[in-house]
Amino acid sequence: QQQVKQSPQSLIVQKGGISIINCAYENTAFDYFPWYQQFPGKGPALLIAIRPDVSEKKEGRFTISFNKSAKQFSLHIMDSQPGDSATYFCAASGNQFYFGTGTSLTVIP
Amino acid sequence: DARVTQTPRHKVTEMGQEVTMRCQPILGHNTVFWYRQTMMQGLELLAYFRNRAPLDDSGMPKDRFSAEMPDATLATLKIQPSEPRDSAVYFCASGSLDETQYFGPGTRLLVL
């Protein structure tokens, strides 16, 4: 049973556009929701994270929107750049830690 | 520049051989994680330790996999005997369940 469902599997966006990746979870005990970015041949790196007591967190061009009642959260990348091309993983944590299946983002110049 | 280190970076072995992967967590981090990444299964948490004690290894096949942390600077993941289905990238991370995890560069394992 997949604890964190992520979509889409892949995404192609024009430079300057907005990239949106969505995740949904079931376990209401989760209390930490990070997003990780992974470049080919590298380990994942934390991009931004949110806790369920806030509905939105913004860091630069990256924003997490969190909907506790719907058990959904999403990553928005504003003004997407070719350097943002990577795989993005959402995750959820409580007593365990679960990654989503990943979204391969390609930003076209 | 503190970072997680992993050795070896690449390993090719034959089915049935023992494989040992090593990880040096960031000094001061008391929680160490082992993950496996494959195209089919994505990123899976295999096990994690806090203060060197195993807290959860429910994601790890018990019959052939073992994870230990003999001291605060070294975590090991061992596969014995290895099988082709174990081919994957194995990541070590240190940090916290509910804070940032810092990932190492991974060990790319190929079992023939």
Image: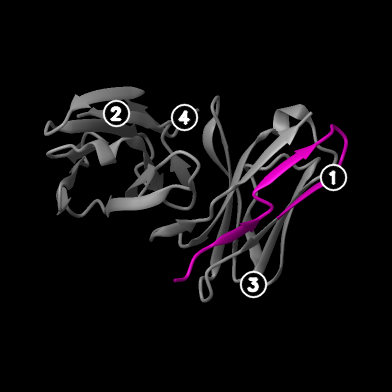
> In the image, is residue A39 above or below residue B4?
above
* Tag shown at residue B84: none
Contact flag, marks 4 and 1 (Cβ < 8 Å):
no
Disc 3 on helix, strand or loop?
loop
Q: Amino acid at mark 4?
A: Gln
Please report the residue visible at 80 percent of the width from the left and 41 percent of the height from the top: B64
Residue B60 appears in the figure:
yes
**Sequence-first disc among 2 and 4:** 4
Contact flag, marks 2 and 4 (Cβ < 8 Å):
no
Residue placed furthest toward the bottom: B28
Please report the residue visible at 71 percent of the width from the left and 34 percent of the height from the top: B110
The boundaries of the magenta stretch are B1-21
Badge 2 is on which residue?
Answer: A106
Quarter of the view holding residue A87: top left
- The Cα atoms of the two marked residues, 3 and 2, are separated by 38 Å
* Tag shown at residue B73: 3
Q: Are marks 2 and 1 on the same chain?
A: no
Assess whether residue A33 is covered by the magenta stretch. Answer: no
Residue placed furthest toward the right: B16
> In the image, is residue A17 above or below residue B104?
above
Tag 2 subunit: A
Q: Where is residue A12? Give x, y as percent.
A: 25, 23
* Tag shown at residue B18: 1
Q: Where is residue B112? Give x, y as percent.
A: 79, 28
